[in-house]
Image (spheres, rainbow, N blue to C red):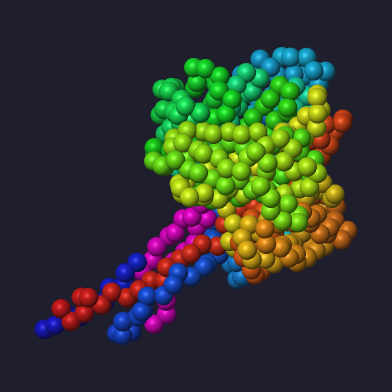
């Protein structure tokens, strides 16, 4: 007697992509005897998202705001869901010898009583509904790292922004960061171990088992030899800060840091503090590619420094161009850049913007090799200088979201680096304390950067979120600058707008009839 067996290949599976998870289900009619042709992967809303926020500051004069947001309409018909940020377990503390009290005295704790960080698992911020930001603030110098997750209708596009104002001392300025999803590899060109800089890489492990991470540093002469960065253990649901200068034998002005997980996964953030030029979070660069787009150089930038690293086995030759509001030009004296394999190259572009906001475009010039890149941007002069960073940013795919926007404090930079214009839809949410959303569509001309304030939500109170989505046309890249000037210092921070992980590609399950009638 013949036996009839019907097997389904990948009848159920789970797909995880950059912290977002979607469920794969069997299509209806799976019992049909006719074979089914393979179909292109479908995009489905994620069912779970994660975000990891490093400890914001060790300064006694720092104030931090957390903002969480999920756009409306990400997962129709999904259950309501939850979205919550919890404190991570405590870990090694930063060196506090340079901490300053509210009077600027080092080592003091004037005006604050230390009660220790919140216990692990303590809820810091919960989001209740899509379309309305939720906020929380803290002035604690021992505020912990946060581990967050969202599911159901709150998962697609869930975004968390961490914004800290450090009023005085080393690193004085505005420190902004879009909290990251866990991953196994991060590239940070633009770090430094030079005198006057204190750069920390923060490693946060969201899982129940330990993660083991290698920290690789590359300078102008190649790999910085140090065994101290190899095999760093990050305990479960915990965070570990590492001072980069402790991994190098000699000070190095321009360093590329590669965070590579041997086992497990982590969220990685790199915070810089300069004695004279302020500080900020350095966002990770987009994945290595032959071309790079770095959007959002402010028009009043007094200094722009480009840092590029070639991680592959080949050298990279790059054309350098500046895309302003009216077209693309080549910076005089900096037409090309040669980057040797395994080495970090840096070049000062000065006041390349010359009063007109724009973006930097790097394209392969003959010899093509993947690179990672970032800009260190300085505004202000003398003792009123402030610094922020712009990494290479991937082009807008589905939708990008950035939280914690302030009226007249936020600016979007949209650049179309190719030969085709792009239409972009920008939606501002209601405010965290009320108001109505607003929407506007912009056209970005080819080879230009369009700099705009996002539409102001009518009657908005508190901060609001902004989503950016390409409607049509060629590739477009984007960033957001938040400016909060204080005491004559042009405090600012710049966040790249990458995909907000609202959906993932899921291959459709197929029937396997190879065992039929055997």
Q: Report the span colored magenta.
A: 11-29
Residue farthest along the front direction in this orientation: 333
In terms of image quadrants, where is residue 69?
Answer: bottom right
Residue 22: where, in percent of width, then height?
49, 62
Residue drawn at x 51%, y 39% is 338
Q: Nearer the viewer, residue 511 or 344?
A: 344
Residue 110: where, in percent of width, then height?
79, 18
Residue 313: where, in percent of width, then height?
39, 41
- Identify whether 6 is placed above or below 188: below
Is 433 contained in the magenta span? no
Q: Nearer the viewer, residue 210 or 181?
A: 181
Is 13 contained in the magenta span? yes
In terms of image quadrants, where is residue 474?
Answer: bottom right
Residue drawn at x 45%, y 66% is 506
Does the image show residue 328? Answer: yes
Which image quarter is the C terminus in? bottom left
Residue 115: where, in percent of width, then height?
69, 24
- State left or right for residue 408 relative to residue 68: right
Q: Nearer the viewer, residue 360 or 209?
A: 360
Residue drawn at x 34%, y 66% is 10
- State left or right for residue 201 relative to residue 177: left
- Identify whether 129 is placed above or below 318: below
Which image quarter is the N terminus in? bottom left
């Amino acid at each position: 007697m013949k036996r009839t067996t019907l097997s389904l290949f990948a009848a159920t599976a789970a797909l995880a992509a950059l912290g977002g998870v979607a469920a794969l289900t069997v299509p209806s009619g799976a019992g049909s005897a006719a074979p089914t042709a393979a179909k292109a992967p479908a995009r489905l809303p994620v069912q779970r998202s994660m975000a990891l926020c490093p400890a914001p500051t060790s300064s006694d004069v720092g104030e931090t705001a957390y903002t969480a947001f999920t756009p409306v309409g990400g997962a129709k018909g999904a259950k309501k869901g939850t979205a919550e940020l919890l404190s991570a377990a405590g870990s090694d503390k930063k060196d506090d010898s340079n901490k300053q009290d509210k009077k600027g005295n080092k080592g003091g704790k004037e005006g604050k009583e230390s009660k220790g960080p919140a216990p692990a698992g303590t809820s810091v911020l919960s989001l209740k509904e899509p379309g309305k930001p939720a906020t929380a603030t803290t002035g604690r110098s021992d505020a912990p790292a946060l581990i967050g997750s969202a599911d159901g209708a709150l998962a697609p596009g869930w975004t968390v922004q961490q914004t800290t104002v450090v009023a005085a001392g080393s690193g004085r300025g505005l420190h902004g960061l879009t909290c990251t999803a866990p991953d196994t590899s991060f590239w940070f060109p633009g770090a430094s171990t030079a005198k006057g800089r204190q750069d920390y890489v923060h490693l946060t492990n969201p899982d129940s088992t330990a993660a083991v991470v290698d920290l690789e540093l590359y300078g102008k002469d190649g790999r910085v030899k140090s065994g101290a960065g190899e095999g760093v253990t990050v305990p479960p649901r915990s965070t570990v800060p590492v001072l980069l200068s402790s991994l190098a034998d000699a000070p190095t002005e321009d360093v590329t840091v590669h965070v590579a997980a041997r086992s497990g996964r982590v969220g990685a953030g790199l915070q810089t503090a300069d004695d004279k030029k302020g500080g900020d979070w350095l966002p990770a660069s987009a994945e290595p590619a032959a071309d790079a787009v770095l959007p959002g150089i402010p028009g009043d930038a007094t200094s722009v420094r480009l840092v590029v690293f070639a991680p592959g086995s080949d050298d990279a030759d790059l054309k350098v161009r500046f895309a302003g509001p009216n077209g693309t030009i080549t910076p005089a004296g900096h037409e090309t850049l040669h980057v040797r394999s395994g080495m970090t190259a840096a070049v000062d572009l000065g006041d390349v913007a010359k009063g007109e906001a724009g973006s930097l475009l790097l394209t392969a010039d003959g010899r093509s090799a993947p690179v990672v890149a970032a800009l260190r941007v300085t505004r202000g002069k003398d003792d009123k200088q402030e610094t922020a960073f712009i990494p290479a940013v991937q082009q807008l795919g589905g939708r990008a979201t950035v939280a914690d926007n302030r009226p007249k404090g936020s600016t979007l930079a949209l650049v179309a680096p190719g030969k085709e214009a792009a239409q972009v839809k920008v939606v501002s949410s209601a405010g965290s304390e009320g108001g109505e959303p607003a929407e506007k569509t912009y056209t970005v001309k080819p080879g230009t950067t369009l700099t705009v304030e996002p539409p102001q939500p009518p009657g908005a109170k508190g901060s609001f979120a902004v989503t950016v989505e390409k409607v049509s046309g060629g590739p477009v890249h984007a960033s957001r600058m938040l400016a909060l000037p204080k005491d004559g210092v042009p405090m600012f921070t710049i966040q790249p707008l990458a995909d907000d992980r609202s959906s993932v590609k899921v291959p459709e399950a197929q029937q396997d009839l190879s065992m039929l009638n055997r």
